Amino acid sequence: MTEGKALGFSPNRFFDEKWYLTANPDVASAVRHGGFASGFDHYRLNGHSDRSPHWLFSEAYYLSRYPDLTRSTLDRLGLINGYDHYLTYGDREFRSGHLFFDPRLFYSNALLTPSDTGDTDAARPATAIPELGPFATFLGQPAFGSTVRVTWYFDPQWYQSTYPEVIMAVQDGDFENALHHFLTSITPQAFCALEWFSEDYYLELYPDIGNAISGGHVRSAYDHFVRYGALERRKPHPDIDLLEYFFTGTVRADIENGLVRDAFVHWLSRRHIRARDADASRPELKKYEGLAARKAESLIPLLVRHPLSFTSKEAPSLSVVLYVHNRLPLTLSTLAALRTTVRGSIEVIVVDAGSRDDTRYLEQFAGGVHIVRLAQTTTRPEALKAALPYITTDTVLWLGQGVRLEHGAITAALSQLSAQASRRSGKPRAGIVTGRILRADDRIQEAGTIIWRDGSLGHYMEGAALEVPEASFRRLTACGTVPCLLISRALIETLDGFSPEFASEAGALADFSLRAAEKGFATLYEPAMIATLDVRDADAPSYDTADMRTLRRRHAAALLDAEPPSPTLLMRARTAGKKTRRILFIEDRIPTRRLGSGFVRSNDIVRTMAALGHEVTVAPIYSSTAPLPAIYADFPPEVELLHDRNYEVELDRLLQERSGAYDCVWIGRTHNLGRLLPILMGHASCLPTGGIVLDTEAVTAPRTALRAELLHLPQTGTVSEALEEELSCAWLCETIVAVNAVDAAVLRDAGYDNVAELGHLCPVRPTPATWSDRRDLLFLGAIHEPDSPNHDSLIWFIREVLPLLKDRLPDDVRFTVAGFLGPAVDLSALGRDPRVELIGPVADTSELYKTHRVFVAPTRFAGGIPFKVHEAASYGLPVVASDLLCRQLGWRDGLEIVSGGTNDPQRFAARLADLYSDEELWTAVRAGSLQVLADENSEKSYMARLSQILQNVFANSDRSSR
């Protein structure tokens, strides 16, 4: 052992002595000077706490990727560090210890590659990998690094053919394999890992990366790309656009479901896979309809033996009126879908207009259906009137042949039919509900229908994909023209059914909606009411010029308020009712609440705008990567969420398509105004120039100066100069919104008088747990980037304050850290403290607020208002915070909050210990913070403040448009 140390040998295959000394020059120096006998000695005595032992394992990456491996977890398992866990458990669990080692990819490829070594121990078949572990197997057969692809980020065959000198270096024993050469070469920028990345192109496209390389933060441009750029969907090669690729096919869903890490890996792993219909043109709609008709025919033999049953002893909750004429298979398809979709008791009334086919024997296929048989010449208005005497419920579903309802469609429609009644003063009650109607090819037939001023009808979003955001929000619409409408029975009786003056069903339905509107009943488009029109009725009359003239004659006054038929007016015409105000809300991202920071406040603003009755469109600068269910669950269904757009690039097209559609453009965050100003000015004639709002969210100049002062960073100018630069584009906005009185004063001092103040919405919801029921400390906040305010405060608290609490709080008190983490944020080093529990994002934070005793907010530099403090206090969890946050909140020490001072670890620790240990102080602070929140941050007061701001904005907008 002594001789091996002196010769620089590695003690075993799991520790690389040579690499360790190269990667840690301070250790190499200590070994040369006799401080340690070897690199392994250093690792064994000290280095295991924070250094990596092998070129194919990263301690920081492993702990960051698997946040469950905190110091306390490792202690419970009796393990030294992450590598100890990896070798003991993680390797055989197929965990990854390095970005360049994918155990599952290695396993699948190794199964296809026989071993070429004579070492009987190392040459065990690849089928033994699960027993040995992928990493251990790889180290036992180093040749795998040249012959088998173990990561999508490195192509060994391409690498060796491109750089033949690598083969010689491996043969000479300088490197174990091609992968070893790439990861340990002293000239990393001279070698590309694969064909589809260019160092020169990446550095030219993103010149800031050069500073990161020269500063030693990353080894090369590719190192940056793999660690950060791929997640940000930066371009690795002139022929690859990851941002565009992300929104094609199943890419986004695959990433969100954890099948691959990023779009680059997805592209690499699937670029050779072609869809079976890749070269095929899309068939005509009639071919899809033909397939749907054949599928409907296949129901006949099934239903002969097992008929549908609508018989029930319970009172029905819904009446369905189905108009049919011949085409029995389509009738059965509609009834089968109805029975599957609606599980409760319903009454079905089939009005048969003189069918001559097997519809005459419908009772044999569907029991419990009431059939009204009429003459062949029976029109749809006559069919509805004939069905009325048999209707016993308050709600009627008017349904057509070949219309198949999808799961949940009726439940969604029923919940909305009368939900808007008296919800807001002056708003019409929904008497008709229409839905998202698909064609047989799964494209949209209509998502509500527009009635233009000339009486023509426009099927909104016809031909678009089912999931397009423009068809995914609830709104009032002019009408629906496909026979799939939920209607109030009282409304049918009041209007005496459908008018017989129209030859087409579309004309009768449009007329019915217009007459309903005259009586104060609106038609509501419910996107969750999804149905498919499998086969159109070729024999049914179409909506023609005669019906148009009839509609104009009957509703001349109402059509004067409609828009002229023009594609440029589509966005204004899609929502019925002139009184609706339209707001374009621009933010960095779709502001889901899980993102924390200012996004929660933006989310509340959007929610409140919708609650005030405005039509809100949310346009993100960067397209969202959050799962769609999570996005839609965070917003009212009336909000249009353009989640799949990147408006740093596409805003120009949006403003062109929606010229003049908005009464207000609300721009969140000052930096977005600067980046979008050229586009906004290019479309100034299309915008409500008096209705442009800058929501600063936080004035950053003072925060930046404070950060520089705390971290001893160079300052290139004064705060006033920085503030002037920050607000250099604010002249465009008629209204500037500040988050608190402090920021409002800064803005007014800078010369802006058009400032409004809007803080956080935070209703109180205290949990019942008392002081004695709780324990432990909590930090809950989003950390989007390294060195952000939350990141800095967390590091400061764990390093400077937490050690001071050792003798002031019980030994078993833990510090829980929760909240959203950006992809570049690594907290694994903080998890090494046995008192720290890193739990990451939490879906339901109420449990944390209920069980912890004190919330910690040690922010040292920040702007705006700390929502995390508001939220914690609203649940009845007292807060100890920096003096900076106390001032921003305007809360008093010992009454609504406990102040930990300014960058003073001793004071912060002492005050935290007081709050944790003193039940009387804890109870007083809890009560005080709940009271101030109830007074200042309630839903009622928040809605009033935002309403007043918007009324002023709309007034300015109206004046500017005259």
Image: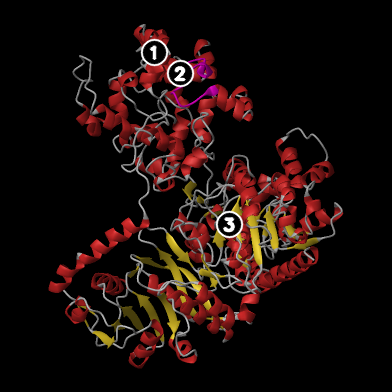
Quarter of the figure that contains the C terminus: bottom right
Residue position marked by numbered label 1 in the rendering: 175
Number of labelled discs? 3
Secondary structure under tag 3 reads strand
Name the side, left or right, on which 71 lies relative to 867. Answer: left
- Relative height, residue 404 to residue 352 (above, below): above
540 or 555, which lies in front? 540
Where does the magenta region start and end? 184-199
Query: Is label 3 or label 1 in front?
Result: 1
Residue position marked by numbered label 2 in the rendering: 184
Residue position marked by numbered label 3 in the rendering: 855
What is the crowding at mark 2: few (fewer than 14 residues within 10 Å), some, or many (at least 20)?
A: some
Name the side, left or right, on which 161 lies relative to 782. Answer: left
Name the side, left or right, on which 111 lies relative to 386. Answer: left
Q: Are marks 1 and 2 in contact (CB under 8 Å)?
A: yes
List x then y, in percent, for residue 741: 77, 60
352 or 43, which lies in front? 352
Residue 918 in view of the camera: no
Which residue appears at 38% of the width and 58% of the height?
442
Q: CA distance from mark 3 to mark 2?
A: 45 Å
List x then y, in percent, for residue 897: 67, 61
Residue 564 in view of the camera: yes
391 or 739, which lies in front? 391
Q: CA distance from mark 1 to mark 2?
A: 9 Å
Q: Disc 1 or 2, which lies upstream in sequence?
A: 1
Quarter of the view holding residue 19: top left
563 or 107, which lies in front? 563
Secondary structure under tag 1 reads loop
